[in-house]
Image (cartoon, helix red, strand yellow):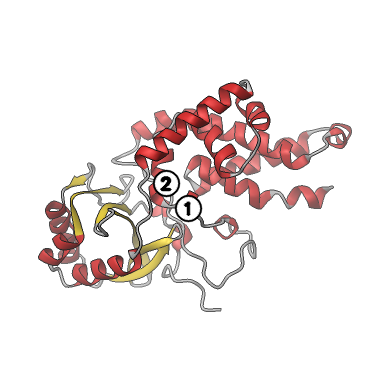
Amino acid sequence: MGDGVVGERRQLINVAYRLLGSLAEAEDAVQEAYARWYALPPSRRDEIASPGAWLTTVTGRVCLDVLGSARARRERYVGAWLPDPLPGRAGRPHGTSGDPADQLVLDESVTMAFLVVLETMTPAERVAFVLHDVFRYPFAEVAAVLDRTPAACKQLAASARRRVRTGAPAPAGGQAETVRRVKEAWEAKDIAALVDLLDPAAVMTADGGGLAGAALRPVEGGPHIARYMAGIAEKAPGLELLERPVNGTPGLVARRAGTVLTVAAFDLAPDGRVARVWVIRNPEKLRVWAGDGAPSPR
């Protein structure tokens, strides 16, 4: 029984990260679910037909509580709050270490664009949508997490789906090529080239958490973003830009002396120009990028 329960951890981490957008909070939620499981009397544990379903329900409820309190915490957060960026783990099979980032399946439900849309949902909408639409849990199981009827959960998921349709753009092809050109223009401090690569209505959002320099409000408009990026390059001699997957899509990592200082994720407009840039500089969110942000060569 014990081994089977431990084997649920990877699925629970995947659910919790999509619900919370924070690796540390996801890990804490899963640990709490396991603590509650092991606190049950053995006779009660033996009665539970599906420990995996029980752990998912408890993890979901813990995440729901965290999402409720996160609103207040994020209002006190310095500047914009963005989800934790995940490195690509090319060449390393999932689940080969205890690192929660290694347990995560990188698919379209963890792209920065998708996670940012999830942030616009109410906690109940987010739980209903992630559990049902992303992980295919039946509404009867979602109802147990939310303590609502299956019909009410179905309505919550439908309302969340509308937000996704209006908020999350369809993935555009050619992102790797666009990101490469952004990198080259950024390194050259070529403002004209950057403006050409950015949608005129592009928006850049930066998350420094008060622990690293970052624009406190979104920078709007291609020309403003281009000047901002060129300014960063001017002020940061010795900064090295690397093309790296961020949450499963092409992105950029900036490091100095082997330390990752910035991770940038991008979203493209239908014409292939950059529509959104998310810049994460809060060092607490970059711990999983320790070293150089490169996939292990092993």
Where is residue 293 shown, x and y percent of the image? 42, 67
Where is residue 213 shown, x and y percent of the image? 25, 52
Q: Is residue 123 visible?
A: no
Q: Is residue 55 left or right of residue 81?
A: right
Residue pointed to by mark 2: 114
Residue 134 picture quarter: top right
Residue pointed to by mark 1: 108
Disc nearer the start of the sequence (1/2): 1
Residue 189 picture quarter: bottom left
Report if the CB atoms under discs 1 and 2 are less than 8 Å apart: yes
> Is residue 54 shown above or below 175?
above
> Is residue 276 shown above or below 39?
below
Q: Which labelled disc corresponds to residue 10?
A: none
Q: Residues within 10 Å of mark 2 (few under 14, many from 20)?
A: some
Q: Is residue 268 left or right of residue 53?
A: left
Q: Residue at x 59, y 37 (%)?
A: 132
Which of these two is toward me, 42 or 269? 269
Q: Residue at x 42, y 33 (%)?
A: 162
Q: Secondary structure at mark 2?
A: helix
Q: Residue at x 44, y 71 (%)?
A: 294
Which of these two is toward me, 49 or 136? 136
Q: Is residue 2 left or right of residue 169?
A: right
Q: Is residue 63 left or right of residue 173?
A: right
